[in-house]
Image: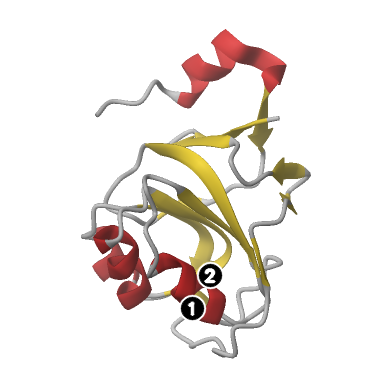
Amino acid sequence: MTMTATADLYDEHGEALASLSLQLRDFGGVRSFSGPVRTVRCHEDNGLVKAVTQTPGEGAVLVVDGGGSLRSALMGDLIAAAAVENGWAGAIIHGAIRDSVAIGGLRLGVKALGTNPRKSSKTGAGVLDEAVEIGGVVFRPGATVYADEDGVLVER
């Protein structure tokens, strides 16, 4: 399935799409992905990320607002593999991941700020499916998000 490039989508739809200026790195084995937004807001705790990726993704993209913390990873290879198994299109993480080489071999789009081998806590603290703001861009559950090598666009 070929997605229209984000640059072309922006040219066609303009300000109907918000463009994330935050420079995220590509880690997943899929570089171009899109789908309806699901959100998690958490801080240095990936329990909720793990729980939601074990549910049917139905082509959704999980947008994780980790507050930009790079102190611990919010996704590793096991969580990413569960996301693939459960039909998620990708994850956009305002924070760190780990197991980046293994994640690079998975059919999953993954964008994140960077990496850290340190595990996060796993209490499940956080909020699921509420609008989150990352880099001045609001990600609303159900809005369509588009991501590729040029960046991230989301319906306003």
Q: Earlier in the sequence, mark 2 or mark 1?
A: 2
Q: Is residue 30 left or right of residue 69?
A: left
- Residue under label 1, please give it: 116
Residue at 51 percent across and 18 percent down: it is 9
Q: Position of residue 5 (x, y in %)?
A: 42, 23
Residue 37 disc label = none
Residue 96 disc label = 2
Q: Is residue 105 left or right of residue 59?
A: left
Would residue 102 be seen by someone viewing this image from the given angle? yes
Look at the numbered discs 2 and 1 and tell me whether their residues touch, using CB distance below 8 Å. yes
Q: CA distance from mark 2 to mark 1?
A: 6 Å
Along the line of sight, the residue nearer the viewer: 8 or 128: 128
Residue at 23 percent across and 59 percent down: it is 106
Residue at 28 percent across and 59 percent down: it is 84
Q: Amino acid at mark 2?
A: Ala
Residue at 69 percent across and 19 percent down: it is 16
Q: Is residue 121 left or right of residue 126?
A: left
Residue lying at the far left of the rendered structure: 105
Q: Position of residue 130 (x, y in %)?
A: 71, 56
Q: Is residue 120 left or right of residue 90?
A: right
Residue 109 drawn above or below residue 68: above
Q: Position of residue 88 (x, y in %)?
A: 36, 53
